[in-house]
């Protein structure tokens, strides 16, 4: 099946530092979504990217979709303790389905 | 808006029992619902894609006779784990979308424990 890998698996940062997670697919994606999951919670939708090379910003979060539509990144500027959680990318397949990446668990040290 | 309710939250039952999990979109009509399985501290593994009124599309390696999915209406999909065994113990979570491609709205998940 489709494989979507994310690196790093874990990231510990000091509050105020930047954070980036990278998502790579073995196949070309139709689109990509990003989710945040807090411990004990369900994934919450952050954003969807559709176009090749697309860049979107949400306050301190910047999302990028690669030119080949096989990779994506999420960058958080000046992390805060509220950013703690696991960030997943989800790559769109040929149908309506999405394949979740392996996730990056972010810990922010106050 | 866009609330998805999943029931039950917890199930503990004996081996050999069949368990039904419901996923409801409360304030929107869901063209498609997805069923995932999530192991502790791991990613969500897509099990099947469910469209209202048609047969579910199962991912490779997922037994369709084991995991029965019914999408009877635009607001309800059910997953039945038939003759459950301890290896079926896991966290099952559903999501629903209004239109494809679009944001997935997740239920709170069901913790299934088979003794």
Image (tube, coloured by chain):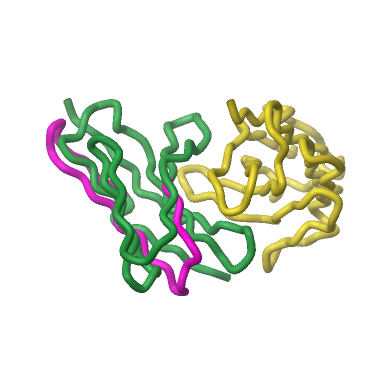
- Colour yellow belongs to chain: B
Q: Position of residue A95 (x, y in %)?
A: 63, 64
**Residue placed most toward the observer, B12 or B25:** B25
Looking at the figure, which quarter contains the N terminus of chain A?
Answer: bottom right
Would you say A69 lies left or right of A108 here? right
For residue B89, what is the image quadrant? top right
**Residue placed most toward the observer, B47 or B101:** B101
**Residue placed most toward the observer, B59 or B110:** B59
Asked if residue B4 can be seen in this view, the reply is yes
Most common secondary structure along the magenta stretch: strand
- Which color was chain A given? green
Q: Position of residue B56 (x, y in %)?
A: 78, 57
- Residue for point 48% across, 54% down: A90
Indicate whether residue A12 is drawn in magenta.
yes
Looking at the figure, which quarter contains the C terminus of chain A?
Answer: top left
Would you say B25 lies left or right of A77 here? right
- Residue for point 35% across, 48% down: A104
Q: Is residue A40 above or below residue A52?
A: above
Indicate whether residue B86 is drawn in magenta.
no
**Which residues are drawn in magenta?**
A10-34
For residue B48, what is the image quadrant? bottom right
Q: Position of residue B82 (x, y in %)?
A: 85, 48
Asked if residue B10 can be seen in this view, the reply is no
């Amino acid at each position: 099946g489709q494989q979507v890998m994310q690196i790093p698996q874990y990231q510990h940062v000091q509050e105020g530092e930047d954070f980036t997670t990278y998502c790579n697919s073995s196949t070309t994606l139709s689109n990509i979504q990003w989710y945040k999951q807090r411990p004990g919670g369900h994934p919450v939708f952050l954003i969807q990217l559709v176009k090749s090379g697309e860049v979107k910003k949400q306050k301190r979060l910047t999302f990028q979709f690669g030119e080949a539509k096989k990779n994506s990144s999420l960058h958080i500027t000046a992390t805060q303790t509220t950013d703690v959680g696991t960030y997943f990318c989800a790559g769109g397949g040929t149908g309506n389905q999405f394949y979740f990446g392996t996730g990056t668990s972010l810990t922010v040290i106050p | 808006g866009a609330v998805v309710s999943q029931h039950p939250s917890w199930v503990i039952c004996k081996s050999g029992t069949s368990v039904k999990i419901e996923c409801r979109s409360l304030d929107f009509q869901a063209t498609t619902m997805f069923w995932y399985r999530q192991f502790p501290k791991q990613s969500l593994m897509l099990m099947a894609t469910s469209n209202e009124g048609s047969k579910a599309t199962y991912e490779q390696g997922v037994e369709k006779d084991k995991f029965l999915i019914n999408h009877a209406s635009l607001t309800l999909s059910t997953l039945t784990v038939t003759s459950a065994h301890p290896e079926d113990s896991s966290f099952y979570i559903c999501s629903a979308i209004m239109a494809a491609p679009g944001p997935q709205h997740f239920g709170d998940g069901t913790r299934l424990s088979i003794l």
